[in-house]
Amino acid sequence: MKEIEHIFEEGEDPSQFLRDWEDYIVKVELEDATECIPGKNFNGGAYSYYTIWEWDIKIQKYELRYASSADFSYCKRFGHFQDCSNCMYFNDDAWSEGIEYCGVDPEYYDIPDIIKEIGGPLKEDHILRVTLVEPEEEEGE
Ligand SMILES: [Zn+2]
């Protein structure tokens, strides 16, 4: 299936789009670039922060995770700089198997929750990327 990315910039309100395309959305990524300075966004102290909702086909909801543009360890559940192996939620069993070791349970969202969380028009230096799977063309069109 082909994926299409749709980008919203500051001042644009993605609410209606998210509602209309609800059945085709596989990922929603909100970037907060308020503090980001190009060239300093990997280890220079001026990073972008991401809130990401990704479709989980088993749960039939969107899994929330956080990320940053920095090269440093960043907990995808709490959304702050930390090495999850030093965290009280560290998952030893998973770590030994080489899989996900942040032991904090994920949160799941529906599109209406995501719309609420985004909260209308995007603020300054915020960018929203919505990934859709291309709707199948109907027979005879
Ligand atoms: Zn963690």
Image (cartoon, grey):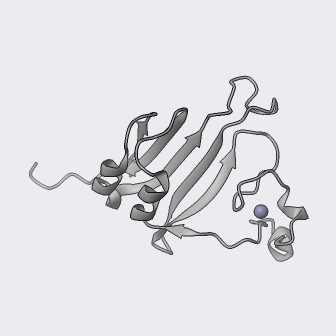
Q: Residue at x 54, y 69 (%)?
A: 108
46 sits left or right of 127 in the view: right
What is the quadrant of residue 68 in the picture? top right
With respect to residue 125, does 77 lie above or below?
A: below
**How far from the left and from the top, in percent, is residue 2?**
38, 47
Image mark count: 0
**How far from the left and from the top, in percent, is residue 114?**
46, 59
Q: Residue at x 72, y 60 (%)?
A: 78
What is the quadrant of residue 113 in the picture? bottom left
97 sits left or right of 11 in the view: right
33 sits left or right of 111 in the view: right
Q: Residue furthest top?
A: 39
- Point out the quarter of the image occupied by ligand 1: bottom right
**How far from the left and from the top, in percent, is residue 21?**
31, 54
**How far from the left and from the top, in percent, is residue 11?**
41, 34
Q: Nearer the viewer, residue 23 or 117?
A: 117
Residue 128 appears in the picture as rendered: yes
94 sits left or right of 26 in the view: right
Q: Residue furthest right?
A: 86
What is the quadrant of residue 44 in the picture? top right
Q: Residue at x 50, y 75 (%)?
A: 59
Q: Residue at x 44, y 58 (%)?
A: 116
Residue 134 appears in the picture as rendered: no
